[in-house]
Image (cartoon, rainbow, N blue to C red):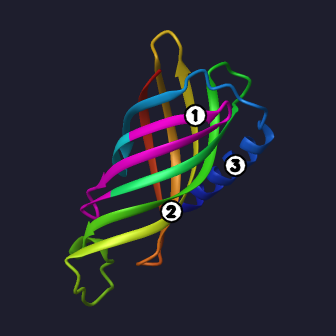
Amino acid sequence: MKTFIRISFVLALVLTVAFSANAQSGYKTGIGFRGGIASGLTVKHFIKSDAAIEGILSTSFRHRGTVITILYEKHAQAFNAKGLQWYYGLGGHVGFHDGHHYYHKNHEHYDDDHVVAVGIDGVLGLEYYIRDIPFTIGADIKPYINIPSGGGYWDSALHVRYVF
């Protein structure tokens, strides 16, 4: 399964570069929900016709904590379909977790009740803007690295946003 995700990520990245024509999003700001490994609220605001800033406030049941993520994303039309866009980007996060659930099982002890995790995030996604009702639906893969644990992880999610 990990190999499939890695191959999908590389393929999507290649397709994103191939379809990197200047995109027109059709909306300025979107607010909605993100459901996946880390679920929560998402806000995306376009600063240019093909570039957006996305903020995600999510909770992780696995680590029992809250994470704030900020991403810079580039958008490009996908498959010559009106309203369908690829996006990719980079950013970072800060998370606040329960230390007893944050560390891996192979750690023999943990002294911290609370852990602050800081890290680097990437994102690769596909989004469709439904013009008749002002909503977007989409899916993304968000690899990230947490600095305290030194581990690399994958997050994937579906999202729905009201746009204006």
**Up/down of 116 relative to 156, above or below:** below
Q: Which residue is mark 3?
A: 13
Q: Work out whether mark 3 precedes mark 1 in sequence or the reverse, and give the earlier one.
A: 3
Amino acid bearing label 3: Leu
Q: Which residue is mark 2?
A: 144
**Up/down of 65 relative to 123, above or below:** below
Q: Position of residue 71 (x, y in %)?
A: 53, 50
Q: Residue at x 62, y 26 (%)?
A: 25
Give the magenta part as a residue range: 42-66
Q: Residue furthest bottom?
A: 108
**Up/down of 31 relative to 7, above or below:** above
Q: Which residue is mark 1?
A: 46
Magenta-span inclusion, residue 64: yes
| CB within 8 Å, label 2 to label 3 | no
* Apparent side of residue 8 relative to residue 146 in the rendered image (left or right): right
Q: Work out whether mark 1 precedes mark 2 in sequence or the reverse, and give the earlier one.
A: 1
